[in-house]
Amino acid sequence: MKAIRVHEFGGPEVMTVEELPDPSPGPSQVLVRIKAIGVNPVDNYIRSGTYARKPQLPYTPHTDIGGVVEAVGSAVKKFKSGDRVYGFAVAGGGAELALCEESQVQPLPDRATFQQGAAIGVPYATAWRALFIRARAKAGETVLVHGASGGVGTAAVQIARAYGLHVLGTAGTDEGLRLVREQGAHQVFNHHDPDYRSGILAATNGRGVDVVLEMLANVNLDRDLDLIGMHGRVVVIGNRGTIEIDPRKSMGKDGTILGMTLFNATPDELREIHAGIVAGLENGALRPVIGKEMPLSDAPKAHQAVMESGAFGKIVLLP
């Protein structure tokens, strides 16, 4: 099989496509013939060696996949050869075949494409965990999704709207604003507009938002504390540097800043998260947006593109 391999940490150029032996499933494993591979910013951080968790070299990057079950181990009960599935937290997803534990695979409804299946794992699980497990968002509350045109952002808008929240979203281009509105945001704001925060406060009649999902905390965190209302929560999903904040802004509101990484999700949380996601895929409430499709050989270009500003949907690689 063909697989992306990383023999040393570094820039996108350290990735090469190589031939590896086809794997065989162990008793509790599912072998998936991969049709699409999701590209996430965290894949970039891991490959560069700057992420807190470093895989043993050499390794095959990417964890989110959509594909068809090729074979199953003797103890696997939930899946059989030929089933359409999506995989998450898969070790070695950037290849033509991947071994998954049964718990890392979920059924992919017929109404979803394989590319959409590859767009679920990190983005949708991150959005779900941020909204409902970290922020404990409730129907009727108002959520602001910063960077709502990216993979996690579009997922968060769809999930929040389906759950009954009032959704505000930001993006930096007309195309991005249109996309966010199409995903269900009640109101959208261009974060390049110097007065966009006044528009957000006006949209809440000056009360402030209940939850902020923050994709770039090193730019926005102090401003987010101006935008939350009483008992408001800011969930830090993405960050690329340091920032100075004024804690007084949170004190008078009993505001909370919550850190978030999907890698900290417990097995019970993951079962809850993916049960909700599968239900949303089945009824059409969740519809992953694909921004770019690229061949496996273009993995270095995909890793560059996923870090560029103006994110628009999900980037996927096609083996």
Image (tube, helix red, strand yellow):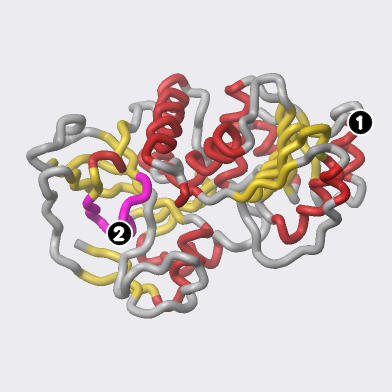
For mark 1, give the secondary structure: loop
Q: Which residues are magenta?
A: 88-99
Crowding around mark 2 (Cα neighbors within 10 Å: few <14, some 14 to 19, many 20+) is many
**Image position of 146 (left or right of 312):** right
Task: Work out whether 187 lies above or below 238.
Answer: above
Front position among marks 2 and 1: 1
Residue behind mark 2: 92
Magenta stretch, main secondary structure, is loop
Residue at the farthest left position: 74
Task: Work out whether 264 lies above or below 211.
Answer: below
**Image position of 93 (left or right of 181):** left
> Residue at the location (77% across, 63% down)?
243
Does the image show residue 256?
A: yes
Q: Earlier in the sequence, mark 2 or mark 1?
A: 2
Crowding around mark 1 (Cα neighbors within 10 Å: few <14, some 14 to 19, many 20+) is some
Specify the amino acid type for callout 2.
Gly
Task: From the top left corner, tell me how far across and down residue 233 is, in percent.
Answer: 72, 39
Dot label at residue 28: none
Task: From the top left corner, tell me how far across and down residue 21 is, in percent.
Answer: 14, 65
> Residue at the location (91% across, 40% down)?
198
Residue behind mark 1: 206
For mark 2, give the secondary structure: loop
| Quarter occupied by the N terminus | bottom left
Q: How many marks?
A: 2
Specify the amino acid type for callout 1.
Gly
Task: Work out whether 301 lies above or below 9.
Answer: above
Task: From the top left corner, tell me how far across and down residue 137 is, in percent.
Answer: 64, 29
* Of 252 and 154, the residue lying toward us: 252
